[in-house]
Amino acid sequence: MRFCDITGQEGIKAKLIQTVSDQRVSHAQLFFGPEGCGKLALAIAYAQYINCTNKQGMNDSCGTCPSCIKYQKLVHPDLHFIYPVATTRRVTKKPQSKLFLEEWRKFLLENNYQAGLQGWYEAIGLENKQGIINADDCNEIITTLSYKSYESDYKVMILWMVEKLYYSAAPKILKILEEPPEKTLFLLISEDPDQIIKTIVSRTLLVKIPGAGFLHSGRSEEEAGYFEPFRQWMRLCFSGKIAELIPFTADIARLGREKQKGFLIYGLKVTGFCSSINYRNQLPAGIEGDELKFIRDFSPYIHQENLPAFNDLFNTALFHVERNAHSPTLFLDLSLKIVRLFKPNSLPLS
């Protein structure tokens, strides 16, 4: 992954490149931002750039030296990944990131580095379980980084979705985060740094990635799959068809928690796209066909009077899903409130 493969985020790219040219690469950095902003791709491009042996005018990695070729295949011996896992039909006990490395590489390459938790869980057959970064993976970090690098200046350890770090396992890596071996780079990736243990955050340099970058190939299949049910949901809410909303929300409630969260995050993105169309006359990147038509047709109904309320409703629902709220009640209540936003007089307020 090269910087030029990532659309947008020019300011972030320039700052990352500058840290290398100034020889001021912080040993532990936390890349955080909303889903779809390209933070994992930026982290990998940054690591590839640091270890490139033929930098192109100090603006990007070359993509052709032996180090870059291995990075682009995710097989470089000095590039290491840790990510949330759990037991599956194949890995029935003591799950560790290294046991899922083949699936991880395939998942990233097939989705052009647009990694979402639900897509990852589906790729490894996690079903409705919650993945975590466990104590065994923390021990693996310490062991792996105790060895000398194989061929590059920097050993790179990327921890994806570090908010999934199991609380009791975190103390194991505090010391190595604060005092890592020479030429070691930790890149932590997060969508919600508020959920990360504070002692971890305090040991990192924060790099905020704004939600404006899109990769050339568009979105993952996981996110695209939310379009049809979301369109149906909004149509039912707009029409005020309560009798049909009850079984529909029951179907949503039967999804796993991560899919419910993905569905709500997609809703937040749609309202953001509508806002961009309304106020900047800017169409969303990487979206076309029926989905683009729906968003354009839907945008007049998301306006300055109700946009904050839509965002508050989706964010509040996300909060309660994360805390294991009763899903049928949650999504039916959310649907009724959306009906009221579209047609304030269609439902009683008490």
Image (tube, rainbow, N blue to C red):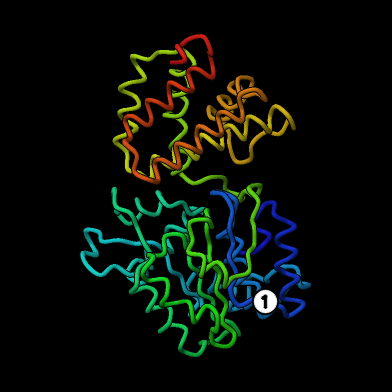
Residue 190, position as x, y percentages in the image: 52, 58
Furthest-front residue in view?
350
Residue 286 picture quarter = top right
Q: Quadrant of the C terminus?
A: top left
* Residue 246 vs residue 333, the one in the foreground: 333
Vertical order, 204 against 224 (above or below)? below
Please state if 230 lies on the left or on the right of 151 as rendered.
left
Q: Secondary structure at mark 1?
A: loop
Residue 20, position as x, y percentages in the image: 71, 75
Vertical order, 97 against 291 (above or below)? below
Residue sitting at x 53%, y 62%: 189
* Residue 77 vs residue 322, the one in the foreground: 322
Category of crowding for the residue at label 1, using alpha-carbon neighbours closer than 10 angstroms: few (below 14), some (14–19), many (at least 20):
some
Vertical order, 289 against 182 (above or below)? above
Q: Quadrant of the N terminus?
A: bottom right
Q: What is the number of callouts on the image?
A: 1
Residue 162, position as x, y percentages in the image: 47, 63
Q: Write down the residue under mark 1.
A: 25
Residue 324 picture quarter = top left
Residue sitting at x 59%, y 85%: 183
Residue sitting at x 44%, y 13%: 240
Furthest-bottom residue in view?
148
The amino acid pointed to by label 1 is: Val
Furthest-top residue in view?
345
* Residue 316 vs residue 112, the one in the foreground: 316
Residue 122, position as x, y percentages in the image: 34, 50
